[in-house]
Amino acid sequence: MRRGAWHQCGDRSQKLVEEQLQQKAGVGIIISPRDLSRKNAVAYAERYRALGAELLLDHQYYVPDFTNARFDSYPISRFRKGVSSLNKISDQDLTDFRNELRVDHEELKADAVIAPAVVYQAGRADVVQLNARLFAAAKRVAADLKLPIYATVVLGRSVTASDQTLQTMLSQATALSCDGWYFGFEFEEERLPSVRETVRRCCVAGLTLACTGKPVLHAYAGPMGLLSFGFGATGVAIGHSQNLWKFTCDRWIVSASQGGGGDAPARFFSNALWGTIIYPDETSQLTAAIRNQVLTHSPFSGPVASNLPWSRWDSGKHLVYMLAKQFSAMAAEKDPRKNAKTAIAVLDKAISLHAEIQQSNVFLADNTSAYQANWKAALEDLLKDNQGDFDFFDLMS
Amino acid sequence: MSYTVDINDAAKMFPDYKFVRPLTPSEQKAAFHVKDKAGTDLCLKLIAPNYERDRLDREIQALQTINHPNVVKLIEYTFSSKPGQQRHYIIEEFIEGEDLQKTLVPGKPWPVKDTARFFVTLCEGLFAMKEKDIVHRDIKPANIRVRPNGSPVIIDFGLARHLTLPDLTQTVDGAAIGTPRYFAPEQFDGTKHDIDHRTDLFAVGILLYEALTGESPFYNPKMTTRAQFRQAVCESTVHLTKASFQALDPKWKILLTRLLEKERAKRPSDARQVGAMLRKLGGL
């Protein structure tokens, strides 16, 4: 698993991702069958590989009975059923499941196999057993193809509600004998996770996985990936839309709503704020001195520098690029403690800058200053309370 | 209670072998050091009549699956029944040397480098088991033979669990078999689904602690009940405050602390990881 930023595909991002790779932003791609038909996935995989990216396919069994037209273009989707049905799957069906999994990975020329897995929930021994079974099938595919096998550990809200349930579940999930972890953590519904305690638990879970000595790919990390290298992650998955910034089961539940963001204005992601600011409505209210600090530019933010109209797509490209570059720099440092301290420094500056903006009587929308202080506190808690984990990580490295 | 058979009675049953001496018996097997006609030293184990066949099959399968210098080798398994005579036995390689319990004695800590060297090799054997999805479940000094060159060999797979095979029993309990003094918390409180390779690593942690400090992390002679011992293993962290532990190099303390974690998720993930750290700590 390459160290650095990985592109979490989805929400029509396939071309955006290609442009990022052309700009040398990101080291790998995670293809999303939810958002890309099989035929297109094969075609894009070829193009991504040509641009030097490592490639993974996440079959997204999180909510296993969810499907849509794009999922249905993958023959393996006939195994998208509820947990109880999957637990009763016959040996013959499991063989067919394995065959479909193998064909997909062969055709996409994936660099590893991500084992399909349902979201872990507290007290659900059936899910643990199902995931072990799916993992065993995927492991055989990986062995046949001579690829590494990554176990999927996506922790649902019921697991992440307390330290004890978290540790109990991690003990079960980490019994799988894999070559790496594909790690997701379900947060409460909000734009970016802001509850200090839950963010700390996410970091603890990631650090526990990292202490197995196997690489951890933090899926659906988004801007929160700033914290991931501080808990020992190897890769951090980023995407352009809020749906790809954090894991939530809701994304794999059929919704009656039309969705979409309407005509919302572009958000400018600022490294200095470690958050977004609405362009041009909010940026134009800033004093020149603050604006210069806030507007940290990328190859995709040219119009902003010239005060010209800027599209939402370009703002998404800018965001992904900025995250990728920050994470690429952090990935070069392998000591998680140092990365945690780097993240704390970034957040410290962001907190100060937000305070400065407020003092100038500009109040930013989107609750965009709600999380930085709590992320910083969560990382400080991690450094203080999990010294033993960091010491063990050092000893292991 | 051990299953014992008089050496003279055993010799009469196996005229093709020269019986040298009885070895430490277990609950279900009487063991002897024997020589075959070519003079090869072997270990012959007679199986108790009440021994569970299914469990024995698993043991044989485990031994046949693993081929590693630090795991005892199976030479022959025979079950035959003729009128008036039933022969049920295992022949394993004979491990020259002694049981670990002879050298791992209270109050006599081992030199650090020797400890590292010994446990690196033990971990190699354990990792070979992990590769075959086999958990020993009864790692203890009596189940580790030490060759004259100091190399350990894991013996007695009578309680081994195959993680990829169906369970022998339908109930979810059944974690609590083995030797309590080397139990992991999940062997006291968990179900058999909580048993995995890291259960053996906890026992390795106890052995390593005993080797480095000369005392047991959890057991003390004042304990009179199983409940007291369970409490020490499952809940207490007193072992981290003992003077003999505190006197260790900080890096050794980190490794021991992790091996003896109550939660499996916090323990090292496998014996290879432990072996790599031991090499580093022992300067090997």
Image: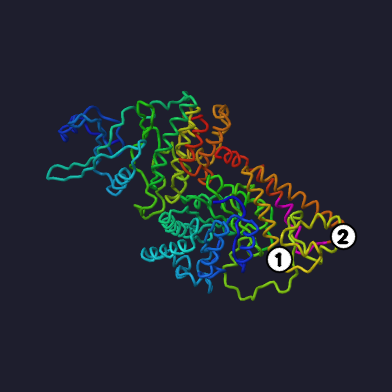
Q: Position of residue A146 (x, y in %)?
A: 43, 53
Q: Of the residues under marks 1 and 2, which one precedes in the sequence?
A: 1
- Residue A223 lies within the magenta run: no
Q: Is residue A187 visible?
A: no
Mark whose residue sits in front, 1 or 2: 1
> Mark 2 falls within which chain?
A
- The residue identified by callout 2 is A361
Task: Determine whether the residue tagged by mark 2 lies in a helix, strand or loop.
Answer: loop
Q: Quadrant of residue A192?
A: bottom right
Looking at the picture, tell me which residue is in the foreground, A371 or A210: A210
Looking at the picture, tell me which residue is in the foreground, B276 or B107: B276
Residue at image location 47% in from the left, 65% down from the top: A83
Task: Determine whether the residue tagged by mark 1 lies in a helix, strand or loop.
Answer: helix
Q: Is residue A359 above or below residue B180?
A: below
Q: Position of residue A387 (x, y in %)?
A: 63, 40
Q: Main secondary structure of the magenta part?
A: loop
- The residue identified by callout 1 is A314
Find the magenta span and give its range. A363-375
**Screen quadrant of the C terminus of chain A:** top right
